[in-house]
């Protein structure tokens, strides 16, 4: 994979570049702010961009703004946003528009190069990747009755694993159930959330967004 990295910390940029190069990725460019990032993307076409969520000059949401700009410029380019802190509302802002080819990971994950490369591969392929820590934290919060009230405990477990971006095969293995049983649970979840078949919407992603929104 061809990667561009944007982070204001030289240690993070260099560390990511080294880890990804050792894993067989090609780091095409790096940037320490989003202005430089967007300028480099004018002449560089990577498979994915890694961008810090808080960058100069205000250190607020520059990474989110850049991610949205990249999506409008190149919808099929993978974008993986990194955050120092667990801020679920940022993840929701990022994913609510068009969650395909997008990911949100905590920076503490980047030392696990296998997880990082897997997340990059998945966003390049069009998946939505959310840090499991965010999903676990949201699961533990008390929630008001809402669109998820009709789901069984098992269905909530399945939906939580879907929110982590896991495939059906991975979820079935994690929960020790057959693929056929898992598919039945997924159908029930989508049906209970009134997510009917649509040529324009990815129902699994919409189900995940419903789950996360209910926990905020």
Image (tube, rainbow, N blue to C red):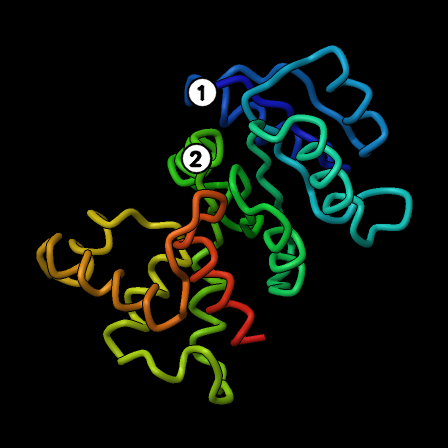
Give the number of callouts. Answer: 2
Q: Are marks 2 and 1 in contact (CB under 8 Å)?
A: yes
**Which tag, 2 or 1, sits closer to the chain's start?**
1
Which one is nearer the viewer's eye here, 183 or 212? 183
Q: Which residue is outermost to the top?
A: 43
Look at 65% across and 28% down and name the residue there. 5
**Disc 2 residue crowd, few under 14, some 14–19, many 20+, Cα 10 Å:** some
Q: Secondary structure at mark 2?
A: helix
In the image, residue 145 sits, relative to residue 194, either above or below, namely: below
Spot occupied by residue 198 in the image (x, y as percentages of width and height)? 43, 49
Q: Name the quarter where the C terminus is drawn.
A: bottom right
Spot occupied by residue 133 in the image (x, y as percentages of width and height)? 46, 62
Look at mark 1 in the image and give the residue it sits on: 22
- Measured in 3D between alpha carbons, the distance from the residue under mark 2 to the one under mark 1, in whole angstroms, is 9 Å
Is residue 106 rendered to the left or right of residue 135?
right
**Disc 1 residue crowd, few under 14, some 14–19, many 20+, Cα 10 Å:** few
Look at 57% across and 22% down and name the residue there. 3
In the image, residue 189 sits, relative to residue 204, either above or below, namely: below
Is residue 210 rendered to the left or right of residue 114?
right
Residue 152 numbered tag = none
Spot occupied by residue 110 in the image (x, y as percentages of width and height)? 51, 41
Q: Quadrant of residue 88?
A: bottom right
In the image, residue 18 sits, relative to residue 199, either above or below, namely: above
Look at 45% across and 53% down and name the residue there. 205
Is residue 157 rendered to the left or right of residue 8?
left
Which one is nearer the viewer's eye here, 75 or 132? 75
Look at mark 2 in the image and give the residue it sits on: 113
Spot occupied by residue 75 in the image (x, y as percentages of width and height)? 61, 31
Q: Secondary structure at mark 1?
A: helix
């Amino acid at each position: 994979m061809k990667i561009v990295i944007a982070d204001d910390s030289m240690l993070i940029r260099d560390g990511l570049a080294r880890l990804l190069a050792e894993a067989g990725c090609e780091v095409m460019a790096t940037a320490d702010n989003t202005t430089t990032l967007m300028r480099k993307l004018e002449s560089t076409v990577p498979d994915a961009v890694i961008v810090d969520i808080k960058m100069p000059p205000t250190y607020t949401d520059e990474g989110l703004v850049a991610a949205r700009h990249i999506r409008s410029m190149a919808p099929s380019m993978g974008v993986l946003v990194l955050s120092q802190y667990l801020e679920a509302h940022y993840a929701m802002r990022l994913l609510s528009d068009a969650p395909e080819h997008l990911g949100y990971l905590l920076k503490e994950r980047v030392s696990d190069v296998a997880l990082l490369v897997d997340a990059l591969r998945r966003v390049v392929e069009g998946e939505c990747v959310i840090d499991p820590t965010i999903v676990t934290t949201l699961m533990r919060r008390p929630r008001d009755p809402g669109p998820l009230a009709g789901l069984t405990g098992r269905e909530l477990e399945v939906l939580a694993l879907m929110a982590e971006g896991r495939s059906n095969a991975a979820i079935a293995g994690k929960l020790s159930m057959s693929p056929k049983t898992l598919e039945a649970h997924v159908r029930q979840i989508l049906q209970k959330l009134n997510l009917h078949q649509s040529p324009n919407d990815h129902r699994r992603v919409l189900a995940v967004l419903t789950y996360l929104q209910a926990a905020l």
